[in-house]
Amino acid sequence: MRDAVKVGPRLYLRRLTEEDASTLAEASHLEDETGLHEDGRIPMSVLSFEAWIRGLDASSTVFAISRRGDGGCIGTASIRNIDRVNGTAETGSGLLRREDRGKGLGTEAKQLLLEFAFGELGLHVLSSTVFEGNVRSARALRKQGYRLAGRLTANVLAAGGVIGDTLVFDITRGDWEHARQEARPAEPSGHDGAGLAGPDDQASG
Ligand SMILES: CC(C)(COP(=O)(O)OP(=O)(O)OC[C@H]1O[C@@H](n2cnc3c(N)ncnc32)[C@H](O)[C@@H]1OP(=O)(O)O)[C@@H](O)C(=O)NCCC(=O)NCCS
């Protein structure tokens, strides 16, 4: 596994690099579920993705989602607007291909992202916004432990000229720790839960 930062049963997270720009650009041209969120409506070039990746600073951490045994990029998982004083940030994730969606891969990637955000970054609460028409994403967030925090009214111009709301979800470190505790197997296993591989696996290429 190339430069793995967090490793799950099927996936791992590694830092997004400029080498991933062409994969992201190609996916932006092939995207056909364009009504799901604000991004994705306008295909972007390789150059613009390269510039975006180069310009990422300490306020963001963006990972490529890779399959174990394959260093490619099947999606991205990000932590944006990191505020280290208040311990807050926003998370986002996306799988590039339609055929990878709805199979739990996004949820696995998000669990790895939460582990990094609450663990390595030591954040306190994370939020995530979803266009109300994106039912799958909202459902995935609830499954991942987020709860509905509120709604921004009529701030998205959706497909067909319909103006829709944005749903705001959040998850605290306490929520996340509680969910991990609940998911922990009854028998003590010596592992850290969440289906993650051990540190040796994570360090391996
Ligand atoms: C959002 C995304 C990352 C979620 O990852 P995922 O792997 O697809 O999510 P999961 O498979 O873990 O969960 C999806 C949930 O929605 C449900 N679902 C799947 N297709 C659905 C559909 N068309 N309508 C409603 N619900 C749907 C699934 O049943 C599942 O819920 P369940 O496990 O409780 O049954 C992924 O779907 C994606 O990349 N979508 C396109 C980009 C996007 O919308 N990004 C988020 C922008 S806010």
Image (tube, helix red, strand yellow):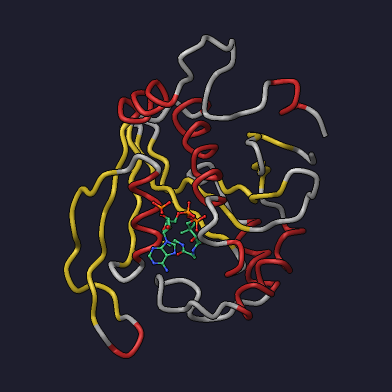
Displayed-image quarter of ligand 1: bottom left
Which residue is depicted at the point 40% across and 30% down? 123
Residue pushed farthest bottom? 160
Picture quadrant of residue 1:
top right
Lateral position of residue 69 relative to residue 105, left or right: right
Q: Quadrant of residue 166?
A: bottom left
Residue 5 percent location from the top left of the image:
66, 34
Residue shown at 59% from the left, 10% from the top: 190
Q: Is residue 178 left or right of residue 188?
A: left
Residue found at x 70% / y 64%? 21
Image x and y of residue 20, in percent: 72, 60
Q: Nearer the viewer, residue 129 or 111?
A: 111
> Left or right of 172: which side holds 44?
right
Q: Quadrant of the C terminus?
A: top right
- In the displayed structure, 138 sits above or below 37; it is above
Residue 15 image-quadrant placement: top right
